[in-house]
Amino acid sequence: MFLAVIGGLFAMLGSAFVMQIDETPWQLVPLPKQVWFNTGLLMFSSLALHFASRDTRQRTHLWLVLGSVTAIGFMAGQFQIWTTLTENGYGLSGAPAASFFYLITGLHGLHILGGLVALGLVWFRLTHSESTKTNQAPIALCALYWHGLLVIWLLLLALLLGLGNEFLALCRSFLLYTSDAADEGDR
């Protein structure tokens, strides 16, 4: 349920992002190459948590360490991207696309931090429990949350790369086509 709420939040932000394209002078923020490295870190983090939810107790700790470290690496990389963009003149109070970039990536980062806190609590519980069975469900929920954040990140990345513009153009052409077809049907 929580992932649906988060998905809705980011869907609304994505909608606002796409709608602003027509309303304001819009120039997408040039994404540094480090975005791709960070995306790889988040993918690995999600994969590690998936394995943690399926593995034995000894290796579960290893997968949790790898998932946590790569998630923290993702966050550090995001801060580096923010610094790079600010130094290159794309500050928070700059162009509307830059403001949206910071808002969207900042909210995603807050959700990653919240996930790290939850993961830490699950991990603490795991280290103080003898039963692996009772810990698998919370680890699996953390993994599901991470998979959701990864999907949201990939969709946000597509939006920030300008694919939202293509989607908007496709929707417009579809609406024009159906409108023209309806007009011809009325004649």
Image (spheres, rainbow, N blue to C red):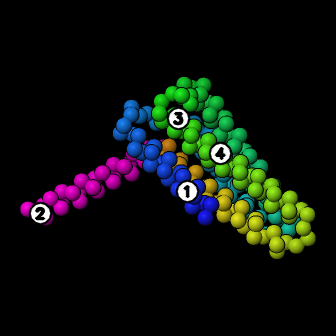
- The part of the chain drawn in magenta is 161-187
Residue 164, image x, y percentages: 43, 48
Residue at the farthest left position: 187
Give the alpha-carbon distance from disc 1 to disc 2, as whole Å: 40 Å
Tag 1 secondary structure:
helix
Q: In this figure, which residue is indicated by the disc labeled 3?
A: 99
Where 160 sits versus 43, above or below? above
Q: In this figure, which residue is indicated by the disc labeled 1?
A: 7
**Of callouts 4 and 1, the N-terminal one:** 1
- Please give the label number shown on residue 186: 2
Residue 72, image x, y percentages: 74, 46
Residue type at tag 3:
Ser
Q: In this figure, which residue is indicated by the disc labeled 4?
A: 109
Quarter of the image with the C terminus is: bottom left
Residue 96 left/right relative to 150? left
**Of callouts 4 and 2, the N-terminal one:** 4
